[in-house]
Amino acid sequence: MSLFKKIVVLMVLSLGCEHKKFLNPYDPINLPPAPELQHPEDNFVSPDNPPFFQWDLKEDTLNPFYGSDIIYEIQISTDSNFFSALFLSMITDYKIYLPSKLFCDSIYYWRVRARYLETDWGEWSKVNKFKVRFPVVGALSIPPHSNDMIIHQNYAFIAYAPG
């Protein structure tokens, strides 16, 4: 083999070593990285009920699926092992989520993982915990007016009359 052919073969091999394996989309090296949680931060006391959840995904430009459609699974639970999920897993294609249910007086834990449509689920993010400042503690039975508000200790009770 000539010197030129040897150099070409070495260049092709060295270029191939700098890229990820692309043969199997379920190979762990091709899965998306764990998302980074942004809001609520760990040990955050949210003034909003429900709070919004936001995360980001690191760029993974060497991945052959980077830039394709990504979906996220978010889990919110009252225990750090996610055995008693208050909110079931929610799948979304956005990096932000606003639950439709209000939170009660408890500590909550949340995490997120990502998936390219062509691959399996990636790793879970780290777990953050949070609490809401004004949790739902009960309901007024018969409010006299739809715009009444009662403040008692650290809780605000707002009368709501469905209309």
Image (tube, rainbow, N blue to C red):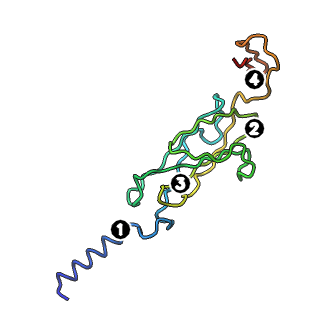
Circles 2 and 1: CB atoms closer than 8 Å:
no
Q: Residue at x 18, y 84 (%)?
A: 3
Q: Earlier in the sequence, mark 2 or mark 1?
A: 1
Q: Position of residue 34 (x, y in %)?
A: 53, 54
Q: Secondary structure at mark 4?
A: strand
Q: Residues within 10 Å of mark 4 (few under 14, many from 20)?
A: few
Picture quadrant where residue 62 is located: bottom left
Q: Please name whichever residue, 90 or 38, is drawn nearer the observer in this view of the structure.
A: 90
Q: CA distance from mark 3 to mark 4?
A: 36 Å
Circles 3 and 2: CB atoms closer than 8 Å:
no
Q: Which residue is mark 3?
A: 34
Q: Position of residue 39 (x, y in %)?
A: 57, 39
Q: CA distance from mark 1 to mark 4?
A: 57 Å
As drawn, 145 above or below 31: above
Furthest residue to the top? 145
Q: Residues within 10 Å of mark 3 (few under 14, many from 20)?
A: many
Q: Residues within 10 Å of mark 1 (few under 14, many from 20)?
A: few
Q: Which residue is mark 4?
A: 155
Q: Earlier in the sequence, mark 3 or mark 1?
A: 1
Q: Secondary structure at mark 3?
A: loop
Circles 3 and 4: CB atoms closer than 8 Å:
no
Picture quadrant where residue 20 is located: bottom left
As drawn, 137 above or below 35: above
Q: Position of residue 30 (x, y in %)?
A: 46, 63
Q: Which residue is mark 2?
A: 106
Q: Earlier in the sequence, mark 3 or mark 4?
A: 3
Q: CA distance from mark 2 to mark 1?
A: 48 Å
Q: Earlier in the sequence, mark 3 or mark 2?
A: 3
Q: Which residue is mark 1?
A: 18
Q: CA distance from mark 4 to mark 2?
A: 14 Å
As drawn, 160 above or below 51: above
